[in-house]
Image (cartoon, grey):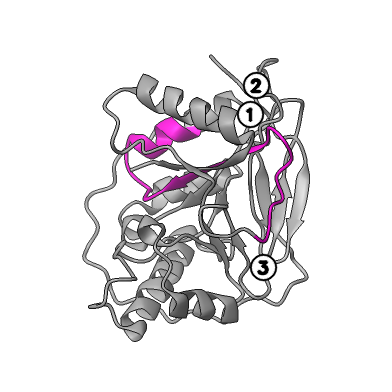
Amino acid sequence: MRKISGLLAIGVIGSGLIVLGGSQATAQLFPRTNATPPAAAPAPATPAPPPPPTAIPAVSPAKQPCNNPDALGISRIVEIDTTGGPGFGFEHFKQMDFLRDKEVVLTFDDGPWPENTPAVLKALANECTTGIFFPIGKHATWHPEILKQVAAAGHVIGSHTWSHPDLSNKKVTPDMAKEEIEKGVSAVKWALGTPEAPFFRFPDLKHPPEMVTYLGERNIAIWSCDLDSFDFKASKPETVINSVFAKLTKLGKGIIVMHDF
């Protein structure tokens, strides 16, 4: 297995903290607890009845002692103030860069989903590291028990809209886009039974300016990326691994987009 020393892993608590640890780590984010919390989101419309719950294998909490001497781990903690809705990821935002050389943030979009999300949790647990998850609101209402496992394992959880539409589409009005954002936030909060981190990722990484401003008013940080794994296009794991490592070798560090759906 190939590794880059100094990998970072991210986790969250409210308005902005990141945890990084060990000589090889993946980063973890925690919003600042003393920052002004965003306004309460309206309750989402009543979703369709969820399918019967699927049995999900248990995942060991991330806080347990690490028994893998070669694990990525977590290297350090970075505090992030989400006031004003800062943006991260050089794909779209050039102003802020909290990563040191060879540090990596692992992020996962579009879950929670049976089999896929538990498999990601197991892989991260085996490496004693964490990531940031951006679940789709609708999926969170279908599989709240899986999302609770993500939280129990110590990962950061943000939001990714209610149903993953392209918010830059001209057919999507500003009011419709705001509803998608707020329903997604509320659905994740409902599934977890507690507010998620004030972190948001736009579907397909398309950032309509009006919604960037809106999230800034809500004090919600926007997460783009430094490199996209394009794992949804690959048929073999080796293709994703080779692509990601080639990009990391070139960039030296980065926020990586992957998917657990």
Snapshot quadrant of residue 190: bottom left
Q: Position of residue 246 (x, y in %)?
A: 50, 26
Q: Position of residue 132 (x, y in %)?
A: 55, 48
The magenta stretch spans residue 98: yes
Label 2 – label 1 distance at C-alpha:
6 Å
Left or right of residue 104, residue 40 in this image? left
Q: Which residues are magenta?
A: 95-121
Judge from the rendering whether residue 37 lies leftward or rightward of residue 137; answer left or right: right
Q: Amino acid at mark 2?
A: Ala
Q: State whether residue 48 is above or below residue 258.
A: below
Viewer can see residue 11: yes
- What's the CA distance linking mark 3 and mark 2? 30 Å
Checking the image for residue 71, the label placed there is 2
The tag earlier along the polypeptide, 3 or 2, is: 2
Can you give x and y, in whole percent of width and height, for residue 160 in the image?
42, 60
Q: Which mark is residue 82?
A: 3
Residue 178, placed above or below residue 59: below
Q: On screen, 143 above or below 131?
A: below
Q: Label 1 crowding class (10 Å Cα cut-off): few <14, some 14-19, many 20+?
A: many
- Circles 2 and 1, Cβ within 8 Å, touching? The answer is yes
